[in-house]
Image: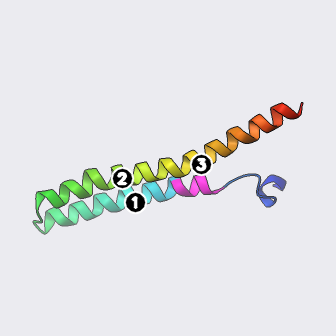
Amino acid sequence: MKDFLTFRTMITPVLVQCLFWVAIVSFVAIAVIDIIHHESYRVVFLVLVVGPLATRIVCEMLILLFRIHDRLVAIESNTRR
């Protein structure tokens, strides 16, 4: 709990993962609605393939920043010994 209160434990990576899954569910729902309303298959393709792929890339970049931070903290703790 102390690490959480002193901002040593990050909650943002968990939030990024949750937002990723919310976005995926949203893209699928939008695609289903587009199919029901007989939208262009290009639109459905973009929503089902490009949307989640772009979302995944952005989320991975955000998570990467936190992983780099974790590695730097590990390096710092190893060099203190």
In front of the other: 46 or 38: 46
Q: Nearer the viewer, mark 1 or mark 3?
A: 3
Report the side of 72 relative to 53 (left or right). Answer: right
Q: Which residue is mark 2?
A: 54
- Amino acid, disc 2: Ala
Mark 2 or mark 3: whose residue is earlier in sequence: 2
Measured Cα–Cα span from mark 2 to mark 3: 17 Å
Magenta range? 11-16
- Amino acid, disc 1: Ala
Report the side of 69 relative to 1 (left or right). Answer: left
Measured Cα–Cα span from mark 2 to mark 1: 11 Å
Q: Quadrant of the C terminus?
A: top right
Q: Residue at x 48, y 52 (%)?
A: 59
Residue 23: mark: 1
User: 10 Å neighbourhood of mark 2: few (<14), some, or many (≥20)?
Assistant: few
Image height of 77 relative to 47, above or below: above
Q: What secondary structure prevails in the magenta region?
A: helix
Q: Quadrant of the N terminus?
A: bottom right
Q: Residue at x 29, y 62 (%)?
A: 29
Report the side of 58 relative to 9 (left or right). Answer: left
Q: Position of residue 14 (x, y in %)?
A: 58, 53
Secondary-structure class at tag 3 = helix
Q: Residue at x 81, y 58 (%)?
A: 6
In front of the other: 75 or 59: 75
Image height of 16 relative to 33, above or below: above
Mark 2 or mark 1: whose residue is earlier in sequence: 1
User: 10 Å neighbourhood of mark 3: few (<14), some, or many (≥20)?
Assistant: few
Q: Which residue is mark 3?
A: 65
Image height of 36 relative to 8, above or below: below
